[in-house]
Image (tube, rainbow, N blue to C red):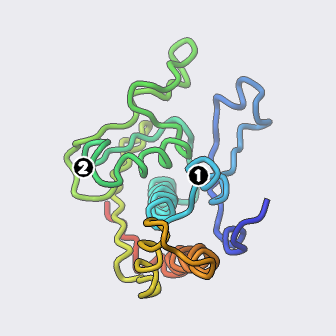
Amino acid sequence: MKYPAFFDTIETITLQDHLSAFLGSIEGGEVEFSYLDIVKSAGHSCPTVAGAYLITQAGLKALYPGETPVRGEVFASFKETAAEGVAGVIGNVVSQITGATTTSGFKGIGGKFARHSLMEFEADTTASVKFKRLDTGATVEVSYDPSSVQGDPAQMEIMQRLMQGMGTPEDKAVFGPMWQKRVAAIFQNIDQVITVSS
């Protein structure tokens, strides 16, 4: 499987998953997610998927300073509805990493390990995502704005030609790398695109 080389340079996200440990799925329950894992699940790499990964990574670091985040013990809130803008896409990535879902998730075993009802939309927050630790009640808000990292000016024009079936073989050859170049730049400028507040 071939993919852009910069995927392998992105910091992974490690969590403790007590459910996986309990059921013998992952020895010790330590689970690691890479950006490539998220791309495979989402089906593509784009500024939104990259942003969702960075939002989750930043939120977990802020919630668990010096600790390993605990999967299934983080609540995520979004200001939009799930169908509005890119909130649903971001929510899917947050869910994959943290285990949090609205009502469709795992119901637990004997009152433990539940993953449902850990995500809400149309919540009282102005951030991209608000995260809350279930054990301590600590919260953190993470905002993502990639507007400072622009892509190649020719990108949208080429995309339009391809979408209209008018693209040339050269357009097809250059568009993907051009698109991923902006995604790579977003990861290279995390401090510009991610804001964390308590």
Is 45 located above or below residue 21 in the figure? below
Give whichever of 172, 22 is nearer the camera: 172
Is 155 located above or below residue 38 in the figure? below
Which residue is depicted at the point 44% across and 86% down?
154
The image shows residue 87 at horizontal and vertical percentages of 34, 50
- Density class for disc 1 (Cα within 10 Å; few <14, some 14-19, many ≥20) is few
Q: For mark 1, give the secondary structure.
A: loop
Sequence order check: which comes first, mark 1 or mark 2?
A: 1
Image side of residue 178 versus residue 161, left or right: right
According to the image, label 1 marks what residue? 43
Q: For mark 2, give the secondary structure.
A: loop
Three-letter amino acid code at the position of disc 1: Gly
- Give the position of the N terminus as an image quadrant: bottom right
The furthest residue to the front? 166
Determine which quarter of the picture holds residue 156. Answer: bottom left
Image side of residue 164 versus residue 3, left or right: left
According to the image, label 2 marks what residue? 79
Three-letter amino acid code at the position of disc 2: Lys
- Give the position of the C terminus as an image quadrant: bottom left
The image shows residue 40 at horizontal and vertical percentages of 64, 51
